[in-house]
Image (cartoon, rainbow, N blue to C red):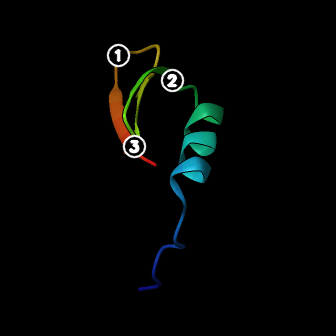
Amino acid sequence: MNKLPALTGRQLIDALSTAGFGVIRTKGSHYFLRHPDGRTTVIPV
């Protein structure tokens, strides 16, 4: 099985934004993203 490519936090936020997630808030170096269907995730940058 191949390894996944390493992504920076910024690249991951950009990818999730194209998938429909939006940044709802930040706290320190963590970005909180939410999808319109209710899914939420936190990305350390």
Q: Indicate the position of residue 30 as horizontal and vertical percent values.
A: 38, 38
Mark 1 residue crowding within 10 angstroms, few (<14) / some (14–19) / many (20+): few
Amino acid type, label 2: Val
- Residue located 40% across and 41% down the image: 29
Q: Quadrant of residue 28?
A: top left
Measure the alpha-carbon separation of dots 2 and 3: 10 Å
Depth check, mark 2 against mark 1: the one in front is 2
Q: Which residue is mark 2?
A: 23
Mark 1: secondary structure: loop
Mark 3 residue crowding within 10 angstroms, few (<14) / some (14–19) / many (20+): some
Instruction: In this rendered view, identify the residue nearer to me: 31 or 6.
Output: 31
Measure the alpha-carbon separation of dots 3 and 1: 16 Å
Indicate which disc residue 43 carries. Answer: 3
Q: Indicate the position of residue 2 as horizontal and vertical percent values.
A: 47, 84
Q: Indicate the position of residue 16 as horizontal and vertical percent values.
A: 55, 38
Indicate which disc residue 28 carries. Answer: none
Mark 2: secondary structure: strand
- Residue 1 position (above or below residue 27): below
Q: Which residue is mark 1?
A: 38
Depth check, mark 3 against mark 1: the one in front is 3
Q: Earlier in the sequence, mark 3 or mark 1?
A: 1
- Residue located 54% across and 63% down the image: 7
Amino acid type, label 1: Gly
The residue at the far front in this view is 28
Q: Is residue 36 left or right of residue 39?
A: right
Mark 3: secondary structure: strand
- Residue located 58% across and 48% down the image: 10
Q: Is residue 14 left or right of residue 3?
A: right
State how many labels appear. Answer: 3
